[in-house]
Every structure is written in C-alpha cells, then in structure tokens.
Amino acid sequence: MAFVFGNEMEYVHHLCIVLELVVVYIQTWILLRCF
C-alpha cells in the first residue's frame, strides 16, 4: 500500500512540475504577444 502511495505522490509531484512549466510557457507567450 505504501509503495502504491509513494508512486502516486511521485506522479502528483511530476504533474505539478509539468503544470508549472506550462503556466510559465503561457505567461511568456502572452508577454511576447503583448510587446
């Protein structure tokens, strides 16, 4: 059970990193479009 939970936490952590990268990418794109 702990093993599955650990993998789940790792997956969520990875997902958060990907989401952060996407947000930064979108913000940069918007800034480039505005200027």
Image: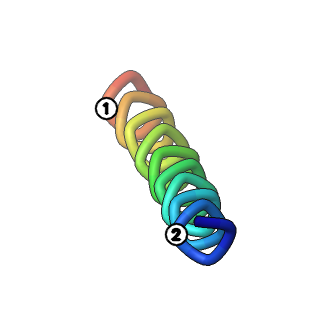
Determine crowd level at label 2: few under 14, some 14-19, many 20+ residues with C-alpha closer than 10 A: few
* Residue sitting at x 68%, y 68%: 2
In this rendered view, identify the residue nearer to me: 10 or 34: 10
Q: Position of residue 6 (x, y in %)?
A: 66, 69
Name the residue carrying label 2. Answer: 4
* Residue sitting at x 54%, y 52%: 12
Name the side, left or right, on which 26 lies relative to 31: left
Q: Where is residue 32 in the image (x, y as percent from the top left)?
A: 41, 40
Q: Distance between the residues labelled 1 and 2?
A: 43 Å
Name the side, left or right, on which 23 lies relative to 9: left
Against 30, residue 8 (above or below) is below
Q: Could you tell which of marks 1 and 2 lies nearer the N-terminus? A: 2
Name the residue carrying label 1. Answer: 33
Q: In the image, what residue type sits under mark 2?
A: Val
Q: Where is residue 29 in the image (x, y as percent from the top left)?
A: 36, 41
Q: Which colour scheme is used?
A: rainbow
Which quarter of the image is occupied by the C terminus? Answer: top left
Q: In the image, what residue type sits under mark 1?
A: Arg
Name the side, left or right, on which 1 lies relative to 31: right
